[in-house]
Every structure is written in C-alpha cells, then in structure tokens.
C-alpha cells in the first residue's frame, strides 16, 4: 500500500483566520466543521462591499453575463442567500443578527416592483428562473429564522414574484428542476402552484437517466458535473420541501440512484482534493462536493462518514489554498485565478456562488457522524483504480503514488442530437482529462488526434460515437476530414495507450499528450524522433507522448502557450506529427513515470498487443467491422 498524497499544510499568511487543523479528527485534510463555517463567513463578508443599499442585489466586479447587470445583481443575492441559509440553519440561527437582517431586507426590496433595486421578473427561459430556485431553497431551509418572521406583505410579494414560474416555460435541461423546486416551495406555503408542472419536471428527469447513477443534462450525450450539483441534488432538496406531499416511490428511486452515483463520484477527486477538470460551469469549483453531503442528508450514500468529509473538505481546502476565494473573500470568474476559458455566455460576476451548494453539509448537525467520525482515505489515497463507466463512455484510472485521477473520454461531447453542428469544446471533446491538468482553451493540440488539412488546419473531433467501454478499455469513432477514425484506449496505471485506425494513408496526423501549466514559468520541454515530453519544475509532474507503432520517425515537438490554461499562466503540450493508417501512441501523466520498454505489435488477426513500461501486457482488441460511409449516417 502506498502512502496517501496529502495536501500541503495551511499557509497562515494566506489564511490568517482559519481555525487550527485537527490531525486526530482529520488526519488527511486537518479540516473540521469550524473550517467550513469560517470559509462560509469569509465568503458572505466578502460580498458586503458590493451590496446595493437595500441589500436586494450584489453587483460584483467583472464582465457581465449575457443576461445583463440587472439579472447578475439578482444572481448575487440568490446564490449568496443559499450560502447564508445553510449557515443560519446549520447554527440554528445562532449567527450575527445582521446576516439574517440583510437578507430579510433584500427580500423586501427585491420583490417590491416600485423599489429601485427590484428584481427582474421570471419569464420564459430567462435567468431569473435559475435564481428563483436558490431563493426558494434558501427560504425553506432558513424558514424559522426568516420566512416565518417576514411580515405578510413581504411574504405576499415573495410568493407573487416566485409565482411567475407557474405556467412559464423552462429550458429542457436541469432548468426543469428549478420549476419543481420553486413550485414545491409555493405549495409548502399555501401559494398557487401547479402539481402537474412539478410532476412533469420530475418525470422529465427520469427520461434522462442512463443507468449507473448517470443522467444526461437534456437530450444528447451531456455528461458532466451537472449530474452532481443539479440532477442528483435537486431531487433530494425537493423531497425536503415536499415532505409528506412527495411520492414515496419517486423519493426512494432518487435515493437509490444517488447512492449508486456516489459509489462512482468518490473516484473523481485527487488526493490533493482537486476534482477532475471536465465539463462546463467549472467556475462553480467545490460545488462538486454537494452530492457527497446530499447523500448523507438523505441517508442515500454508500460512503462511510469519514470518507464523505475527507472528500468534501479536501476539495474545499484545495481551492482555498490556491486563491479561491481571493484576498477580498470573493470567488472570481475562473478556476484558481480569474480565467475566462472556463466560462460560458451565461457566466456573470456572481455565477461562481453556485459553489454555495458545497456548504449543504452544514445542515447536518455538529454531532452527526460526518462531522465527528475520523477521516478515512478516499479511493485514490490508497490504491490504483481502473473504473469503466459505460453510461457516459468514460474510463477512470488513478494512481495512489501521485494521487492523480485521469478520465478517458469516449462517450460525451455535449452536442445536441443531429442535425446539430458538430462543434468542439475543449471541456468535452478531448480524449482525456485529469485532476492535475486542464485543457488548453481555446482548443489546443492536447489530448487530441487531428488530421491536418492541406493548409495545416487540424480536424475537430466533433461528434463522438461510442463503441465500447468495459474493463480497462474504451473505444469510439469520429469523422475527420470526412474519414471515419476509430480509437481504442487501453489504460494501466498512469499510462494510456491509444490505437487509432485511419482509413487513409499519407494524410498528416498530429496527436498531443497532456498540457501542463505553471504560474512560475514555462514547463521544461524535451523532444526527439517519435517522442516528446514536458515537465513542471516545481513538483516534477511530467506529460509524455511516445509513438509505439506506425509513427516511424515522426517528429516530436512541444507546443508552448501563455494564458490559455486554467491551471497556470505558462503551458506546454508534447506533440507527435507523422502519417499512418494504424497509429499506436503511449501517453503518460504523473511523477517519475517510466515510458521506456513499452511497445506495440500487430498480430495477423489485426489485434494490437501492448506491452506497458512495467512489463504488463494487454490487448487493444481487433479492429471493429467497417462502418457506413459518411453519406449514410444520420
């Protein structure tokens, strides 16, 4: 058994107000409930300078979202109110009275159509729908200390504002659950609502379930952290609001599916607490911990209490040690530092405060086992793992020696069903993602195979067509310059071997390994015939790409960039360029990872046999039967 990879100790100059660590209760992170409360208070206090006079909006610095500053100000109120509600309820109201008073004042001002700080109305497919759900959740969880103490006029205006959701049309995605939450809260306070709309939203969620604990976020192959911080989370919170009105069969089904998901979700966190960097809305950061707490809250988790806290505290600690929140106590638009590459059009200055969901654990009393049980190691802390996830088409492989989790992607592209355009996104189209790296943004050569057009333009991956995902291998195909390119990935330890079958020879091909990034300076680069490598000086993290078969004397190069990576200012990617109809590539990510001694051979039956650097032999399987030509595909 290898020693677990432990986060670096707290820097008291960067976190002067954090409580002392507790190595007996929390031997892996040192963090306790007091740390969570302190970070929550810092986040809430950091917002105060940006509150409007009536506290109905928080106008944070930064570029506005496509919804505009008025909606962004509401977003600041709603998402921070969710955090405030967890903090208030978790302490049974024993917080400074000013916290309760300012959100009560904001509710009164925001719902008054004649007040200069009033909120934009809820309308079809508009951003206030998202924020209405956070307000409804916060009102429910803080009810004895806020809702019950509002005067009748304010309560009437709140239900009138929320009530615009009744009969409105939400986007056909996780937004359907915002309607469920908002209207269930209205039902709980005796306000007009539609039971049919609530039931329809929950039924739509069932349509998206793909098994194994995985939902797609709407039609298509849309798998990412919305499965964690929305599609599993809101059913748990809906059941808390609905109480005896909830269908017991639906509640039991959601709990079972959450339990199954958490059995997998625990593998998405590195030993340093970092979640796998994949998908959209990554600026929500430690919101990835929300379903861990939800499982404990709903008695729907397979994880021991000490593992739940170790994983959740690990990811909150990971970000606080790396600048989120920043020195002002603000969550910026980025990952660690501000970084626009992880943003979407809907991202506004207050959007990162969906991270408030991570503080759901404060609703569990201080004497609950998740707070009192000693921390236990997470999966990556103690053993190497390979885990096939057929629903999203992913392979996870992690290594305890360096605490890194790697995700190999042969199933999700976030594209709507055809005939939608096959656009690439750096957070969905790559062959691999990890807890230690981020993709180049905009699109770079990292973890991508491209056929190069005559003018040198690289082909996109486009729509991913899954073929197989089982054991230690996964496969898919995609179209590149009109050709069906099939790829099989086989993983072992820190290595992935990719077998690419390209039905045309002589076309230039480029393949990249992992992009490494560092704030202190460019990664150290080296390359030669058939190989390339980059290494981070500070910790020795290394990314290597090696041609094992078909590449011949392909050129190994390194592509360097600046300000294109969420993990650091300077980044570099090892790359191979060559030609061939069958190409076998070894990609490696880790510290002290050998790459010599690996090879690949092609048997007469068309099977690629692989020898990994540690001597392990695995098969990539035979080529699949030829697929239909491009003109025949839908």
Image: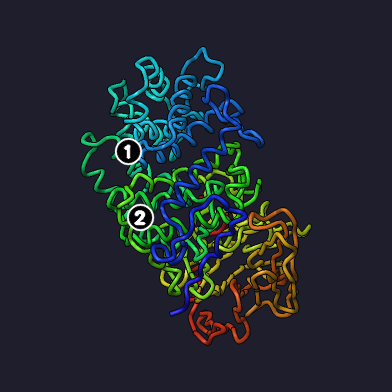
> Which residue in the structure is indicated by mark 1?
238
Q: Is residue 341 left or right of residue 109?
A: right
Q: Is residue 496 left or right of residue 288?
A: right
The answer to whether one can see residue 634 in this image is: yes
Mark whose residue sits in front, 1 or 2: 2
Name, please, the residue furthest toward the right: 455
Q: Which mark is residue 371?
A: 2
The answer to whether one can see residue 123 in this image is: no
Quadrant of image for the N terminus:
bottom left
Q: Is residue 490 above or below residue 614?
A: above
For image coordinates 47% across by 66% down, the residue present is 396
Q: Is residue 586 above or below residue 519?
A: below
- Residue closest to the eye, 331 or 23: 23
Q: Position of residue 277 (x, y in %)?
A: 55, 57
- Residue closest to the eye, 102 or 64: 102
Q: Is residue 580 above or below residue 518?
A: below
- Residue closest to the eye, 228 or 633: 228
Q: Position of residue 155 (x, y in %)?
A: 37, 20
Q: Quadrant of residue 450?
A: bottom right
Tag 1 near tag 2, CB within 8 Å: no
Mark 2 or mark 1, which is nearer the start of the sequence? 1
- Residue closest to the eye, 547 or 290: 290
Q: Quadrant of residue 202?
A: top left
- Asked which colour scheme the image uses, the reply is rainbow
For image coordinates 38% across by 46% down, the residue present is 362
Say which element carries label 2: helix
Say which element carries label 1: helix
Within-10-Å neighbours for mark 2: few <14, some 14–19, many 20+: many
Q: Position of residue 591 (x, y in %)?
A: 60, 75
């Amino acid at each position: 058994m290898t020693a677990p990879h432990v986060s670096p100790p707290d820097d008291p100059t960067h976190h002067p107000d954090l409580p002392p660590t507790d190595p007996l209760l929390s031997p892996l992170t040192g963090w306790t409930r007091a740390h969570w409360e302190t970070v929550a208070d810092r986040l809430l206090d950091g917002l105060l300078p940006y509150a409007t006079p009536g506290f109905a909006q928080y106008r944070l610095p930064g570029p506005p979202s496509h919804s505009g500053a008025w909606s962004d100000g509401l977003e600041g109120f709603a998402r921070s109110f969710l955090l405030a509600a967890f903090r208030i309820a978790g302490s049974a109201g024993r917080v400074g009275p000013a916290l309760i008073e300012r959100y009560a004042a904001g509710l009164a001002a925001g719902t008054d159509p004649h007040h200069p700080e009033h909120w934009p109305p809820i309308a079809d497919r508009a951003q206030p729908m998202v924020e209405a759900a956070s307000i409804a959740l916060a009102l429910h969880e803080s009810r004895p200390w806020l809702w019950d103490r509002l005067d009748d006029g304010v309560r009437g205006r709140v239900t009138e504002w929320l009530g615009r959701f009744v009969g409105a049309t939400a986007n056909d995605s996780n937004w359907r659950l915002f309607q469920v939450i908002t209207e269930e809260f209205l039902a709980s306070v005796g306000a007009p609502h539609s039971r049919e709309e609530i039931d329809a939203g929950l039924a739509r969620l069932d349509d998206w379930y793909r098994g194994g604990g995985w939902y797609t976020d709407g039609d298509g192959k849309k798998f990412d952290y919305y499965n964690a911080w929305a599609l599993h989370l809101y059913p748990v919170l809906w059941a808390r609001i609905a109480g005896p009105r909830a269908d017991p069969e639906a509640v039991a089904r959601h709990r079972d599916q959450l339990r199954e998901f958490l059995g997998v979700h625990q593998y998405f966190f590195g030993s340093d607490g970092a979640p796998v960097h994949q998908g959209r809305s990554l600026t929500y950061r430690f919101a990835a911990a929300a379903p861990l707490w939800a499982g404990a809250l709903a008695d729907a988790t397979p994880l021991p209490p000490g593992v739940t806290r170790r994983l959740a505290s690990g990811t909150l600690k990971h970000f606080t040690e790396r600048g989120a929140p920043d020195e002002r106590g603000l969550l910026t638009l980025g990952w660690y530092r501000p970084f626009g590459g992880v943003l979407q059009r809907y991202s506004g200055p207050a959007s990162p405060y969906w991270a408030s969901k991570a503080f759901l654990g404060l609703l569990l009393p201080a004497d609950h086992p998740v707070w009192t049980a000693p921390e236990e190691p997470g999966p990556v802390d103690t053993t190497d793992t390979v885990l096939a996830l057929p629903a999203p088409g992913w392979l996870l492989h992690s290594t305890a020696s360096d605490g890194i989790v790697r995700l190999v992607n042969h199933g999700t592209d976030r594209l709507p069903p055809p005939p939608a355009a096959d656009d690439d996104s750096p957070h969905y189209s790559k062959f691999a993602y990890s807890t230690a790296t981020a993709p180049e943004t905009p699109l770079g050569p990292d973890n991508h195979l491209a056929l190069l057009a005559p003018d040198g333009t690289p082909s996109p991956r486009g729509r991913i067509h899954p073929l197989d995902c089982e054991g230690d291998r996964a496969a898919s195909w995609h179209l590149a310059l009109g050709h069906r390119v099939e790829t099989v990935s086989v993983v072992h330890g820190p290595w992935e071997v990719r077998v690419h079958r390209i039905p045309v020879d002589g076309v230039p091909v480029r393949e990249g390994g992992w992009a490494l990034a560092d704030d202190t300076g460019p990664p150290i680069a080296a390359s030669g015939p058939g190989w390339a490598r980059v290494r981070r000086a500070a910790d020795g993290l290394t990314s290597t790409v090696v041609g094992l078969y078909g590449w011949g004397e392909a050129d190994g190069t390194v592509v360097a960039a600046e300000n294109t990576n969420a993990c650091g200012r300077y980044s570099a990617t090892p790359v191979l360029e060559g030609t061939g109809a069958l190409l076998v590539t070894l990609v490696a990510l880790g510290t002290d990872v050998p790459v010599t001694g690996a090879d690949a051979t092609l048997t007469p039956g068309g099977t690629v046999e692989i020898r990994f650097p540690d001597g392990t032999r695995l098969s990539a399987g035979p080529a699949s039967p030829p697929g239909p030509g491009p003109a025949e595909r839908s």
